[in-house]
Image (tube, rainbow, N blue to C red):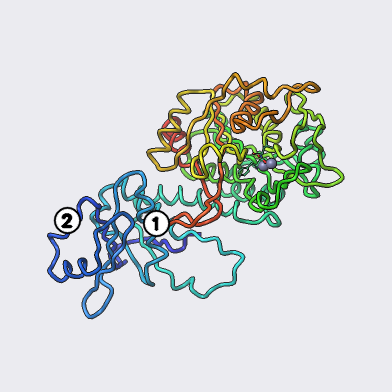
């Protein structure tokens, strides 16, 4: 996935990438030769963050490349433009930043992600071998960056693969492949067995598809270590069901398993780092389709918890499948339950596409995640589990409805629905995210995106790490 990154050792003789802190540009320049000063001036170069300038070497050869950066949370992205724009060759960061581990890690992560592409459905353009290679030192910072990048890359790939090749069965296969790599146990409860084992809500939503619904269950680590359970919405395609989505809204709905992609990417980071935790990943994987078997508006369905739910809208399917998974997650009384879900359009109206909404019953957890998010440029923003709105989920016919009669506060309403099922969990966070980049930016191409998992990974490392 990241074959543009190679290992650097004493025999590597890379073209130098010289990072220049934006604020240090003048002092850097004053130390340069007259020729370099003239070249820099002729190019109007000022080492603004992310700005690159190639310096000529002797006899017309490529000399080195300058890259401007600011050493803050966003430094990652300052380096991310390099892999796609450098000409063929082998490059390496100058010694000036290899002593600064935190900065080296950010630079390395940007250099990894800058080479991410989703090209498995395109014929080889013949340019693959001609791509610039970046040689990274074999240090802790580079290893951490690699681990994080591989988790993010996995999440992006799973989202980008279209629904015809990423149904519930393929999502299960992806979890099994990941589990095999790290010695995790992966099982799945499929189709009719969901009813036998009391996961009726997952079954009801998934029954409308020819592709069997399932609950994917990955378990890894020492059974006696602190328990962490991640839950991810795995709606492999969301047509909206009978309350059908308009075509423009349906177009992107292969990404409705984006929550499950986050938790698998995050699980990869945790397992590869060998954190001393007992990790469990639960993914209700379904397709929300229309058919003679599909559930209808006004149906009343059962949940694992025993609560009945009246279906106000079949397009609010994510909360229904998550309800059974959260009940199961909370039943083990883990230290932490975190769910990721592309749950509501309303969260996007409130916060935009780049800022996931965070809900939690635990202020410490919420504050920790907000802080990490800002520090790592992997942000999320807390919204309240506003008690006053709970009655909006009341139903006359059942224990609750899956939607509110009001069009306002939809992300909060959805979170309050989940809260009924996460009730027993002592520390629970729910992250309502987009999982998609609408535009191309360096290191962040249009398509599936990891959001919030670096922030959660750091929190788990800090709390439970060795
Ligand atoms: N998967 C969608 C939510 C979604 C849409 C997330 C677009 C990100 C971008 C979810 O299943 C859904 O359709 N929710 C409805 C709920 C409504 C019917 C109460 C929504 O948000 O419109
Ligand atoms: Zn929906
Ligand atoms: Zn959905």
Q: Is residue 150 left or right of residue 111?
A: right
Residue labelled 1 has its Cβ within 8 Å of some atom of ligand 1: no
Residue at 31% x, 54% y is 49
Q: Does residue 219 show up?
A: no
Estimate the spatial distance between the alpha carbons at disc 2 and disc 1, rounded to whole Å: 24 Å
| Quarter of image, ligand 3 | top right
* Closer-to-camera residue (361/193): 361
Q: Is residue 14 left or right of residue 432?
A: left
Residue ID for mark 2: 26
Quadrant including the C terminus: top left
Which x, y percent locates residue 5? 41, 61
How crowded pointer 1 is (Cα within 10 Å; few <14, some 14-19, many 20+) is rated as many
Residue at 43% x, 30% y is 368
Disc 1 secondary structure class: loop
Image quadrant in which you'd find residue 95 = bottom left
How crowded pointer 2 is (Cα within 10 Å; few <14, some 14-19, many 20+) is rated as few
* Closer-to-camera residue (279/294): 294
Residue furthest right as drawn: 292
Which x, y percent locates residue 439? 50, 55
- Select label 2 or label 1 by which is in front: 2
> Where 435 sits versus 442, above or below?
above
Which x, y percent locates residue 147? 45, 49
Residue at 62% x, 38% y is 343
Q: Does residue 171 show up?
A: yes
Residue ID for mark 1: 80
* Closer-to-camera residue (211/315): 315
């Amino acid at each position: 996935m990241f074959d543009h990154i190679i290992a650097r050792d004493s025999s590597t003789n890379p073209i130098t990438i010289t990072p220049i802190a934006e604020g240090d540009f003048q002092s850097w320049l004053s130390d340069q030769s007259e020729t370099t000063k003239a070249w820099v001036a002729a190019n109007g170069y000022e080492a603004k963050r992310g700005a690159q300038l190639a310096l000529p070497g002797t006899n017309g050869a490529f000399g080195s490349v300058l890259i401007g950066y600011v050493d803050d949370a966003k430094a990652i992205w300052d380096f991310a433009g390099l892999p796609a724009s450098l000409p063929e060759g082998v490059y390496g960061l100058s010694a000036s930043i290899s002593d600064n581990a935190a900065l080296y890690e950010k630079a390395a992560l940007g250099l990894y992600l800058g080479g991410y592409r989703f090209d498995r459905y395109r014929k080889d353009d013949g340019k693959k071998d001609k791509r610039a290679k970046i040689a990274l030192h074999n240090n802790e910072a580079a290893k951490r960056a690699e681990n994080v990048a591989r988790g993010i890359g996995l999440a992006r790939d799973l989202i980008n693969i279209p629904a015809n090749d990423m149904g519930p069965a393929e999502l299960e296969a992806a979890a099994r492949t990941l589990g095999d790599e790290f010695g995790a146990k992966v099982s799945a409860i499929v189709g009719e067995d969901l009813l036998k084992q009391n996961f009726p809500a997952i079954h009801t939503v998934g029954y409308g598809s020819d592709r069997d619904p399932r609950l994917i269950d990955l378990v890894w680590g020492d059974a006696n270590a602190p328990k962490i359970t991640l839950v991810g919405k795995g709606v492999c395609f969301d047509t909206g069901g009978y309350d059908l989505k308009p075509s423009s809204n349906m177009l992107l709905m292969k990404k409705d398993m984006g929550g499950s992609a986050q938790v698998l990417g995050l699980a990869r980071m945790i397992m590869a780092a060998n954190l001393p935790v007992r990790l469990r990943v639960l993914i209700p994987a379904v397709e929300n389709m229309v058919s003679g078997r599909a559930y209808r508006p006004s149906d009343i369905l059962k949940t694992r918890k025993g609560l009945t739910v009246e279906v106000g809208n079949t397009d609010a399917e994510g909360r229904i499948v998550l309800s059974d998974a959260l009940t199961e997650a909370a039943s083990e009384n883990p230290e932490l339950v975190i769910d990721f879900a592309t749950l509501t359009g309303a969260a996007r109206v409130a916060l935009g596409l780049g800022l996931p909404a965070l809900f939690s019953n635990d202020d410490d957890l919420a504050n920790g995640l907000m802080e990490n998010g800002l520090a790592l440029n992997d942000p999320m923003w807390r919204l309240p589990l506003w008690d006053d709105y709970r009655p909006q989920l009341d139903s006359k016919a059942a224990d609750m409805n899956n939607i509110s009669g009001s069009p306002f506060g939809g992300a909060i309403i959805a979170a309050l629905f989940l809260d009924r099922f996460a009730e027993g969990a002592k520390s629970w966070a729910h992250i309502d995210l987009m999982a998609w980049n609408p535009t191309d930016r360096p290191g962040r191409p249009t398509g599936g995106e990891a959001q919030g998992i670096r922030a959660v990974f750091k929190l788990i490392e800090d709390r439970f790490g060795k």
